Amino acid sequence: MPSGTSPRSRHTMTEQMAEEMLQLSSQLFEKMISQQQAKVLRLAREAVPNISPEEVRNSHDFPELKEHPTFEFEDGILSGLIAAQIALRAEIKGRLPLEPPAF
């Protein structure tokens, strides 16, 4: 690395580029997450017919879901998609040039 160059400066992106990447990735992740949420809710309702979407987020309260053959797997995929969305946002925002704080 050349003298006087920070590791961060090699991987910066413009605000416009970051905004475009955030918008594109957000649309894709929202679609994937929405589809996976619907799948998880459908599987949860196979075990607990009247379970609400809010209750699915607290699945540990329902032992029947532990016994479902694929619920935890699909719920794990949903968690992974959400984690990937957060990580990608952080990575893109982390590549923006540092700006001095506004006073």
Image (cartoon, helix red, strand yellow):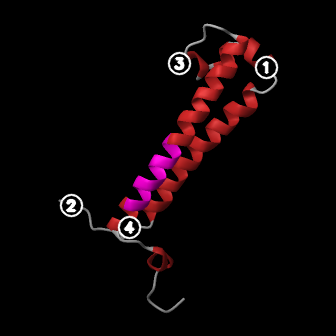
Q: Earlier in the sequence, mark 2 or mark 3?
A: 3
Q: Which residue is mark 3?
A: 54
Q: Which mark is residue 102?
A: 2
Eyeballing the image, is 47 above or below 7? Answer: above
Marks 2 and 3, how far apart in space? Answer: 39 Å
Q: Which mark is residue 68?
A: 1
Residue at screen point 44% across, 89% down? 4
Residue at screen point 65% across, 26% down? 40
What residue range appears in magenta?
20-30
Q: Which amino acid type corresponds to the residue marked 3 in the rendered image? A: Glu
Q: Earlier in the sequence, mark 4 or mark 2?
A: 4
Q: Which residue is mark 4?
A: 17
Picture coordinates of residue 36 (x, y %)?
61, 34
Q: Which amino acid type corresponds to the residue marked 4 in the rendered image? A: Met
Q: Earlier in the sequence, mark 1 or mark 4?
A: 4
Q: Which amino acid type corresponds to the residue marked 2 in the rendered image? A: Ala
Q: How many marks?
A: 4
Q: Earlier in the sequence, mark 2 or mark 1?
A: 1
Q: Secondary structure at mark 2?
A: loop
